């Protein structure tokens, strides 16, 4: 699977998870700016915007999916959120959210380590595990 296809699959699975499990509605995808990118913008029943960074991994060969969220990535996301708000004129309360999706099973590994650290981890779809975390 090509890298771009993997990323698209991750964003599609994250969207399905948000809508069916969390009850959120996607209002924007792949918002790109010179300073960074927002994978998904969503809203729920409350007037809060969720700015979502999605990471998808087919295997655990390159480490746990949450290890890809670095300080620099968070800073780029914050700058992209500022640009998105300015462009849309939407200054509702918001939060940054990480959704990590990893294929479960012997080849995909497991996010069982997330359970040990007290983080939320759900099985979803056909052999995937999904983790949702707020980014501070």
Image: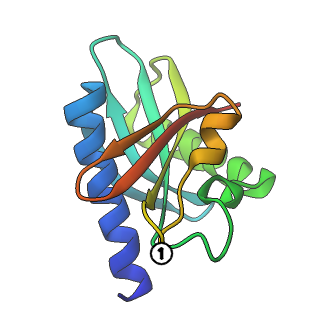
Give the class, few, some or many, for how many residues have Cα within 10 Å of label 1's Cα (few <14, many ≥20). few
Residue extending farthest bottom? 2
Q: Secondary structure at mark 1?
A: loop
Name the side, left or right, on which 118 lies relative to 43.
Answer: right
Q: Is residue 126 above or below residue 3?
A: above
Residue extending farthest front? 106
- Quadrant where the N terminus is found in the figure: bottom left
Give the image location of residue 105, x and y in percent.
43, 64
- Quadrant where the C terminus is found in the figure: top right
Give the image location of residue 100, x and y in percent.
50, 51
Name the side, left or right, on which 55 lies relative to 48.
Answer: right
Count up the numbered dots.
Answer: 1
Give the image's coloring scheme.
rainbow
Residue closest to the eye, 105 or 16: 105
Name the side, left or right, on which 78 lies relative to 93.
Answer: right
Give the image location of residue 47, x and y in percent.
35, 13
Residue at 63 percent across and 41 percent down: it is: 114
List the residue tagged with mark 1: 107
Q: Is residue 5 above or below residue 38?
A: below
Residue at 24 percent across and 52 percent down: it is: 125
Residue closest to the eye, 56 or 40: 56
Residue at 38 percent across and 75 percent down: it is: 6
Residue closest to the eye, 74 or 105: 105
Residue closest to the eye, 99 or 94: 99
Residue at 30 percent across and 67 percent down: it is: 9
Residue extending farthest top? 46
Give the image location of residue 81, x and y in percent.
55, 41
* Rendering quarter of residue 70: bottom right
């Amino acid at each position: 699977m090509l890298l771009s296809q993997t990323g698209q699959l991750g964003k599609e699975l994250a969207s399905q998870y948000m809508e069916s499990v969390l009850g959120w509605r996607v209002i924007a995808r792949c918002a790109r700016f010179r300073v960074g990118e927002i994978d998904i913008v969503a809203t729920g029943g409350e007037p809060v915007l969720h700015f979502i960074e999605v990471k998808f991994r087919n295997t655990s060969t390159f480490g746990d999916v949450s290890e890809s969220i670095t300080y620099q990535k968070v800073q780029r996301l914050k700058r992209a959120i500022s640009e998105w708000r300015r462009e849309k004129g939407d200054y509702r309360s918001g939060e940054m959210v990480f959704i990590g999706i990893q294929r479960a099973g012997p080849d995909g590994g497991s996010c069982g380590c997330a359970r040990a650290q007290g983080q939320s981890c759900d099985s979803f779809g056909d052999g995937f595990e999904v983790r949702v975390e707020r980014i501070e």
